[in-house]
Image (cartoon, grey):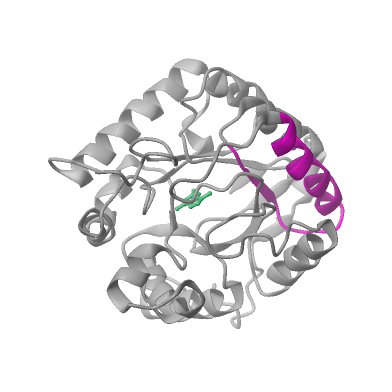
Amino acid sequence: MLNCNGFSLDLSRPRVMGILNVTPDSFSDGGRFFDPGAAREQALRMEEEGAAVIDVGGESTRPGAPEVPLEEELRRVVPIVESLRSILKVPISVDTSKPEVMRRAVAAGAGLVNDVNALRADGAVETVAELDVPVCLMHMQGTPRTMQHSPRYNDVVAEVKAFFEERMAACRQAGIAEERLLLDPGFGFGKTLEHNLALLRDLEKFTDLGRPLLVGISRKSMIGAITGRETGERLPGSLAAAVMAVERGARLVRVHDVAATVDALEVAWAVMDKGKGSSKNSGCPSGTGKSRHFQSRK
Ligand code: 9MG
């Protein structure tokens, strides 16, 4: 069980992270939730559909996206985190690489840091060490501006694994307990289709690092490259990838289409025979949401 700033997140079985982009330019839903009212409605809808975490991001990480200045990212993210904190029963994650945004979002109620840059920005690792919330370390080759120019690896799986080991060591040295870490191979972040497929095929190799795996494949270009579909038509392909990731050990799946993914993972988990007594309809508590134990620690 992860303690997410007063909310608990149980990753003893696969869960869904709902994407809430408060940006004008994200690749699939850019601009739709830029308005605070629309963002709140979408967050509540995703929670109702079964999301265990809502991931709020104020800077697009699509290939070639421009950088967002600190003040603008704070203006987009902090008020929405503040307003969601009192209406959601599930934790909020903040998708950022900027230490000041991490600090201010957690002060506003965010319970998890999702960093596509794996705390490599100046001051990020020290900031998270002080914050006492879990953090997702994602692998990326290059930056969102440059990452798809010509990604190269000798052995993508081995190199991503070595990256995780290096970042886990950096966190340990900074005083971040290993129990607070999640790992994500970063599908589409400085990877060709072949690299993405190799990572998904061999995802299980990362499980021996002992930390929960997060994956984000929803509607991404790898699904488009395989199926020939536009972003709005990639749900079936995204579900197939989510199920295969869970079968290989993923415990958190970052998606746009929460209801459909929750159902797909429910079926996958039942088939995997690890869900005895823990499926949605088996009478077991969902395992997510506000926890008195964690709230009393605050
Ligand atoms: C913010 N963001 C976009 N894609 C992502 C992915 O694949 N993983 C994580 N952790 N964050 C992502």
Magenta-colored stretch includes residue 119 = no
Q: Nearer the viewer, residue 171 or 271?
A: 171
Q: Residue 68 location, x and y as percent?
A: 62, 37
Residue at (29, 45) in percent of width and height: 208
Q: Which residue is drawn at the image coordinates 50% and 17% (left, top)?
A: 174
Q: In front: 14, or 214?
A: 214
Please tell me in which quadrant of the rendered image residue 284 appears: bottom right
Query: Is residue 72 within the magenta segment?
Result: yes
Judge whether 248 appears above or below 161 on screen: below
Q: Is residue 134 above or below residue 246?
A: above
Q: In the current view of this chain or complex, which residue is farthest to the left? A: 154
Based on the displayed image, in which of its 4 quarters is residue 90 positioned? bottom right
Q: Residue at x 60, y 54 (%)?
A: 25
Is residue 128 shown left or right of residue 91?
Answer: left
Q: Position of residue 229 (x, y in %)?
A: 39, 78
> Which residues fall within the magenta stretch?
71-96
Q: Nearer the viewer, residue 97 or 174?
A: 97
Residue under the point 49% across and 28% down: 119
Q: Nearer the viewer, residue 209 or 292?
A: 209
| Image: 272 above or below 153 | below
User: x and y percent of residue 219 in the render?
Assistant: 46, 68
Horizontal arrangement in the rendering, residue 270 relative to residue 191 (left or right):
right
- Residue 88 placed where, x, y %? 79, 58
Which quarter of the figure is the C terminus placed in? Answer: top right
**Observer able to see residue 283:** yes
Confirm whether residue 53 shows in the render.
Answer: no
Q: Count of labels shown?
A: 0
